[in-house]
Every structure is written in structure tokens, then in C-alpha cells.
Image (tube, grey):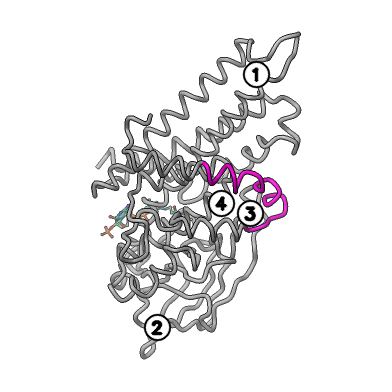
Amino acid sequence: MDFLLTEEQVMLRDTVSKFAKERIAPVASDNEKNHRYPADIIKEAGEMGLMGIAYPSEYGGAGMDYVSYFLAVEEISRWCASTGVIVSAHSSLVCDPIYRFGTEEQKQKFLPDLLSGRKIGSFSLTEAGAGSDSGATKTTAVLKGDKWVLNGSKLFATNGKEAEVFVLIASTNPGQKTRGVSAFIVESNTPGYKIGKLEKKLGIKSSSTAEIILEDCEVPKDNLLGDLNKGFKVAMVTLDGGRLGIASQALGIARASFEDSLKYAKERHQFDEPIANFQAIQWMLADMWVEYEAAWLLTWRASMMKDKGMNYNREAAMAKLKASEVAMKAATTAIQIHGGYGYTEDFNVERYFRDAKITELYEGTSEIQRMVIARSLLS
Ligand code: COS
């Protein structure tokens, strides 16, 4: 598919692929089994410009585009989906809204540390009672003097344990749901901020998923991100971009499932020949690749549209829906091709299977993606 990419994009992809193979692949399984955050890899990724690929160099970004970003997240996720989501949540869900909605002062203050990876970002939208219905936010922010006082708790914040900068959604006009929430930039060293429960998950165990508790957490007045009571739009625009990141992560998992299966099918002998000689296996491999390329093209298109400043809300949802379902199916097929061995920890496909599932859930379930797509078709 290189003919769809610029020379710079191909170079970036190949550089990230080399980095991922050399630095991420050898430690991915062990880190995941031990719930270990890959701090040194994230530091290196920051030094390489991978924590701020699509943002201008004036704020410390790499000055590239969203197609490059999607290619990089795919390459990283090919070897480690946990590292993929650490990069993606940081970039799409924190750097992006600050760059897009922040004041010049906010950009100058927060972006250089974030885009260089010196500080990690996390996005806090979800609550116990506000999952798919994200307008039902109960966390409140009340203006007292020159501070916003935040109270409540947030759930499932990716990077929540390591992050120092949060983009957090709170209600500023309770009862008004989507028209009464605002976005804030919250630093983890703010008194009244604390980390609550750390989730124990099925997969992506090297990335943290945290509860964030806010008890009279006083945030400077200037940390309001975007307009008052317009935070739902900040969240939705941010999630459009986030869905590209998750589509890219899912593509990485799908490709890993395919590549490992192809290799195994050639090596594994049964009935005195490689199982790749059997049509049943060949058809599985053919279907995996067709589906992967279809999802890749959808993700490329949505990323191109974002780069061109077009409305890509529907296309991002399509890419995320397709890529996540392709990843889940590819990981399931990969285990089938590996047979009983695929069910053991001796092969990476069991990790891909566990990691794939989350891509159908976070940043909008597959049902929410279908809702977004259908609404757009019917409008
Ligand atoms: N870009 C800009 N504005 C958007 C938007 C988008 N992508 N999506 C919605 N909006 C705007 C709407 O235009 C509407 O504006 P007005 O108030 O001016 O009319 C407002 O936001 C409310 O939209 P809507 O009425 O569609 O809100 P709903 O409560 O029906 O919710 C869904 C819409 C379900 C699509 C939304 O809540 C959603 O995406 N939920 C999933 C959240 C999610 O992904 N959570 C994962 C956690 S983050 S890890």
C-alpha cells in the first residue's frame, strides 16, 4: 500500500518498525505478564518524537501528519498493544484537545512537556454512571474566586497512574447533560487529586487504567479548556481523533495475528506436511489479510481526511469499528491456526486475543460506532 504514502511517511513507518522490533518486541510479553509500564521505551519514543508526531515543532512536536501517526501506532501495536495505547491515549486524547482548543498560554505551558514525552497525558471522561452516555457526567466543577473546585470520580483513565497532565470533563451546569459540561486541564500534583483503584484487566496489562478521585481539587481558573459548557464537543471531537488511534492499534494486533499465523502455518507439520498446504488454513490466512487491508484503507482514509481538515466523524467511527472487529477475528483465527499451542502462553497469539477485545470497547463500543455511523447516514 506504499503507493498511498509519501516518502516521509514510509521513512517514518520503517524507522518506527525497526524501533518496535528491536526495543519493544523483546520485552512486550514479559512486561505484559508482569503489568509493567514500559517507562524506558516511552522515554525513548519521546526522544524520537513519537509522543507528538502530528503537532507543530513550535510546540515541540515532530511536525508530521495524522497518517504518519496512524502508521506509527500500528507499528508499535504490532509488537505491543499496551505500548500502542499508551502512545495513542497520550497523543490523541490529551495533546490533541490542548492543541485544538487550548489558549496560546495553555499550549505554551503544557505542550512542550507532553509532545516530547517528558510528561504523560491521560483523558478522564468516563464515570461509573457515564460510560456510553458520556453526557451523564456527575463530577462537578464550581468556580470559587480564581479556582475551579472539582469533586467526583472518574473511571478507566488510560495512563492514569503515570500521567501528570489530565484533560478531564466535569459538569459546570448540572442537569444540562451534554450542554452543561466543560473540559479542564488538571495536573496530578494538584491538592485534592488522587489515584483510586487500578483496574486488573484481561489484556493491555502494561498500560495502567485508573480511577481518579477529586476531593475539593482546586484547579486554576485558566485551566478551563475551550468554552464554558462546551466540554461535550471538546470530548466528542477528541474522541473522533482517538478512534483513529484505536483503529491503528487494532490494525497492529490484526497484523501481528496474521504474521505469526503465516509463519506458524509454514513451520507446523501435520499429516507429513506443513499445515499451510491445507486449504482450510489457506482460506483463513486469505480472509485475515483481506480484512486487514480493508481496515487499513478505512483508517488511512479517515487519517487523510483529518489531515485535510475535513469532517471525518463518520469515517473515524467506520475505521475503528472495522479495525477492532478485524483484530478480534484475526486473533481468534490465529489461535485456531496455532491449535492447542495457541491457547498457551508459549505463543504470543493468546496475548493478541486478550488485547484485541478492548479495541471493541474503549473510546466508544462497537455499538456506539454503529450509532455514530447510522446517525450520520440518516442526517
Ligand atoms: N463533533 C462535534 N460535535 C459533536 C460530535 C462530534 N463528533 N458528536 C456530537 N456532537 C455534538 C452534537 O452536535 C450536539 O451538539 P448541540 O448540543 O449543539 O446540539 C452535542 O454534541 C450532543 O450530541 P448528541 O445529542 O449526539 O449526544 P448524545 O448524548 O446522544 O451522545 C454519543 C452521542 C452516543 C455518540 C456520544 O455520547 C458518544 O460518543 N458516547 C461514547 C463515549 C465514548 O466513546 N466513551 C469512551 C470513553 S473515552 S476512553
Q: Nearer the viewer, residue 15 or 96?
A: 15
Q: Which corner quadrant of the image does residue 10 belong to?
A: top left
Please check the rendered image and state whether residue 35 is part of the magenta-colored stretch, yes or no. yes
Q: Is residue 134 left or right of residue 351?
A: left
Please check the rendered image and state whether residue 32 is part of the magenta-colored stretch, yes or no. yes
Q: CA distance from mark 4 to mark 2?
A: 32 Å
Which of the two marks, 4 or 1, is nearer to us in this view?
1
State which image quarter holds ligand 1: bottom left
| Neighbours of disc 4 within 10 Å: few (<14), some (14-19), many (20+) | many
What amino acid is found at the position of numbered circle 2 in the picture? Pro
**SS class, disc 1:** helix
Q: Establish if 339 lies above or below 116.
A: above
Q: Is residue 312 left or right of residue 209?
A: left
- Precedes in sequence: disc 4 or disc 2: 4
- Asked if labels 3 and 2 touch by Cβ distance under 8 angstroms, the answer is no
What amino acid is found at the position of numbered circle 3 in the picture? Ser
Q: Residue at x 64, y 63 (%)?
A: 198
- Precedes in sequence: disc 1 or disc 2: 2
Q: Which corner quadrant of the image does residue 43 belong to?
A: bottom right
Which residue was labeled with disc 3? 206
Which residue was labeled with disc 2? 220
- Asked if labels 1 and 4 touch by Cβ distance under 8 angstroms, the answer is no
Which of the two marks, 1 or 2, is nearer to us in this view?
1
Which of the two marks, 4 or 2, is nearer to us in this view?
4
**SS class, disc 3:** loop
**SS class, disc 2:** strand
Q: Quadrant of the C terminus?
A: top left
- Asked if labels 3 and 4 touch by Cβ distance under 8 angstroms, the answer is yes
Which residue was labeled with disc 4? 83
Q: Whole-percent x and y of residue 353?
A: 63, 37
| Neighbours of disc 3 within 10 Å: few (<14), some (14-19), many (20+) | many
Which residue was labeled with disc 1? 266
